[in-house]
Image: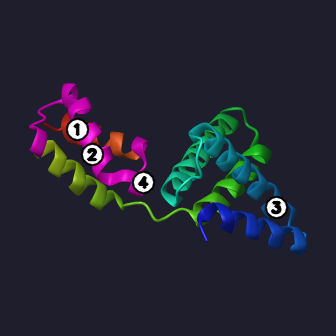
């Protein structure tokens, strides 16, 4: 059973358990997965489903930032709860130390010397890390490393 089918099974369980929050969040995730499937014109692999989930979690983080700026703590709490649920389905991300080590390796391989070389580093780094790291976090780590050079 793939991840997409597992979400549908969990949705059925949430409906039976009358868990409205989980039901609604799973419906949003299934809709996002279905939209990605339609756009790709084929059934999504588990790796592609993980990419959709990462995009959804990134959207929640962005919304949380905006709602905090607007002093909408009620919406922050809702988005945070959705984010927490989404993250239970995602594989663990690399730790900061592991991310820094991988970035240092790529910086050395491409011969990056300053912030102007960030593009040289990010492409190979993201290709190497795949879905094990958030692009925004990777960018921050690479900027720190290159700024120190």
Residue occupied by mark 4? 131
- Judged from the image, the secondary structure of the residue bearing numbered disc 2 is helix
In the image, residue 126 above or below residue 11: above
Separation of residues labelled 1 and 2 (CA atoms): 6 Å
Which badge, 1 or 4, is on the more N-terminal residue? 1
Which badge, 3 or 2, is on the more N-terminal residue? 3
Residue occupied by mark 2? 125
Which secondary structure dominates the residues rendered in magenta? helix
Which badge, 1 or 3, is on the more N-terminal residue? 3
Q: Which residues are magenta?
A: 109-136
Residue occupied by mark 3? 23
Q: Residue at x 42, y 60 (%)?
A: 93
Q: How is the image coloured?
A: rainbow
Instruction: State yes or no: discs 1 and 2 in contact (Cβ < 8 Å).
Output: yes
Q: Residue at x 67, y 68 (%)?
A: 6
In the image, residue 100 above or below residue 141: below
In the image, residue 44 above or below residue 72: below
Residue occupied by mark 1? 121
């Amino acid at each position: 059973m793939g991840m997409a089918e597992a979400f549908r099974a969990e949705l059925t369980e949430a409906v039976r358990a009358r868990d409205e929050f989980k039901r609604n969040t799973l419906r949003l995730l299934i809709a996002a997965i279905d939209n990605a499937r339609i756009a790709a014109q084929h059934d999504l692999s588990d790796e592609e489903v993980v990419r959709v989930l990462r995009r959804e979690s990134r959207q929640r983080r962005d919304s949380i930032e905006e709602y905090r700026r607007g002093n909408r703590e009620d919406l922050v709490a809702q988005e945070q709860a959705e984010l927490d649920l989404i993250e239970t389905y995602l594989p663990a991300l690399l730790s900061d130390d592991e991310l820094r080590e991988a970035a240092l390796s790529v910086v050395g391989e491409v011969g990056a010397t300053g912030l102007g070389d960030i593009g040289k580093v990010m492409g190979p780094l993201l290709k190497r890390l795949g879905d094990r790291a958030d692009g925004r976090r990777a960018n921050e780590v690479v900027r720190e490393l290159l700024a120190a050079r």
